Each structure stands twice: as C-alpha cells, then as structure tokens.
Image (cartoon, grey):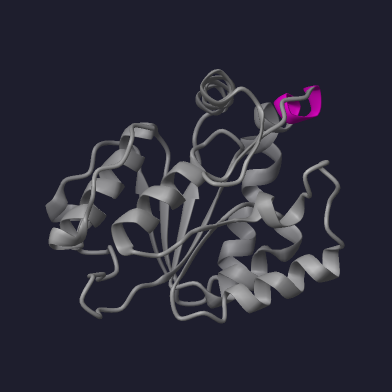
Amino acid sequence: MMIVVGTAPFTAANLLRFVVPVAAGGARVTGSAIVGCGGSGKSWLARSLGGLLGVTPVHLDGLYYDQNWKPLDQEQFAALQHGLVGAPRWIIDGNYASSLPIRLQAADTVIFLDLPAWTCLCGIARRRMRYGGGQHKDIGVYDRITRDVVRYILGYRRRMAPRVRKLIADHGGNAEVVVLRSRRATRGYLAAVTAQASGSARPVSSL
C-alpha cells in the first residue's frame, strides 16, 4: 500500500508516478473509494473524476437516504455496496464507516480528503448558498446542516479520522492511498489525473 500525503500543489511529474493509469481507449480504470469529512469535497471530486474517466460516480448518501431522509436498513445498504464494487469500473464517495471495509477491500485507489475542520465548514456553507439545501441527486449533493453535523465536522480529525486511517490500514490491501489535506492539493491531484487521461478530459467546475 502506498500512501501519498498532499499538503502542497502537486506537479504532473511527482503525481504521475502514483496515479493509476487511466484512458478512454480501454486502459484500466480503477475502483476508487473517496472518503472524508462532510464538506471536504467528496462528491465534487467524484463527479470530476467520473467526468474525466467516463465513469458514473455513486454517491452513498443517495443510496442511504430516501426523499424524507429516512435511512436504509444496514444489511440492505451493505448488500447494495457489494453489488456496486463488483463492477469493473466504479467511483464511490461517502463515509459510512461500518460498511467502509466493503469498498476498501475492492478498491484499487482510496482517496482520503483529510481537510481542516474550518475548510469543511466553509465547504458546507458554500454548498448551502449554491444549492439551497435539500437533496440534489443529479449532482450528489445532500445538504442537511444541523448542530450534530457541525459538531461532527469540528471533531472529525480528532475522533473519526483515526478510525478511518485504521480501517484503511486493516482493509485497504494493496490499494494506492492518496491523502489530500487541502483544496489546493485536491485540485493538483485532479490536474494530474487529467494529464494522465490525455485527451479524454473535459473541464470541471471549481471546488
């Protein structure tokens, strides 16, 4: 397992050494699991990578909640994920630690968005201003800001991130793990994937 921690802008030279080869003409496309705190940009990155690689991303929030925010039964939720990771090409974003091993064991690439709490809080604030809250399934935005959500974000690096790192270590196998710790690093990673995908890329909106 290779772990690359991004805290600064990446150059194509140092990123291309670990970005798994992808192309439009039949080259391998990885199964990619994207995890991280709420507001870190998981859905945006999933949409952006999906657009570049020709893979429709799956946003787990859309599977877990119905239109009234009622959660799916845990066994059903796990069964759905087992089916999804059986596909030859997939990108899935979402946390759900209890079922995260399903994705980690099947993934070729794990992307952990380990951003500061205030960055994530700004992310959910921008999301609210842009989309007005609620569920937007076409773009994978599920926006419900509560006190519990804010507390979760504030405590994520202290309480949840260590659990996520342990799950990755225990279940990630030989997956390549990319840890991105800033918006700038995330944009740099996406730029490197764009370069790797050659002429198959298309522009994406800003994070």
Q: Indicate the position of residue 72 as horizontal and vertical percent values.
A: 83, 58
Q: Indicate the position of residue 145 as horizontal and vertical percent values.
A: 72, 25
Residue in the foreground of this view, choosing between 65 and 104: 65
Instruction: Let me know if residue 66 appears in the view.
Output: yes
Residue in the foreground of this view, choosing between 182 and 5: 182
Q: Indicate the position of residue 202 as horizontal and vertical percent values.
A: 23, 50
- Taking the magenta stretch, the answer to whether it contains residue 125 is no
On-image quarter of the N terminus: bottom left
On-image quarter of the C terminus: top left
Q: Indicate the position of residue 174 as horizontal and vertical percent values.
A: 45, 77
Q: Looking at the picture, does residue 97 appear above or below residue 150?
A: below
Secondary structure mainly formed by the magenta segment: helix
Q: How many marks?
A: 0
Instruction: Let me know if residue 4 appears in the view.
Output: no
The quadrant in which residue 82 appears is: bottom right
Q: Looking at the picture, does residue 149 appear above or below residue 87?
A: above
Q: Looking at the picture, does residue 154 appear above or below residue 101?
A: above
Q: Is residue 167 left or right of residue 181?
A: right
Q: Is residue 72 left or right of residue 47?
A: right
Residue in the foreground of this view, choosing between 192 and 112: 192
Q: Residue at x 84, y 64 (%)?
A: 74
Magenta stretch? 147-151
Q: Is residue 186 left or right of residue 91?
A: left
Q: Residue at x 75, y 70 (%)?
A: 78
Residue in the foreground of this view, choosing between 204 and 195: 204
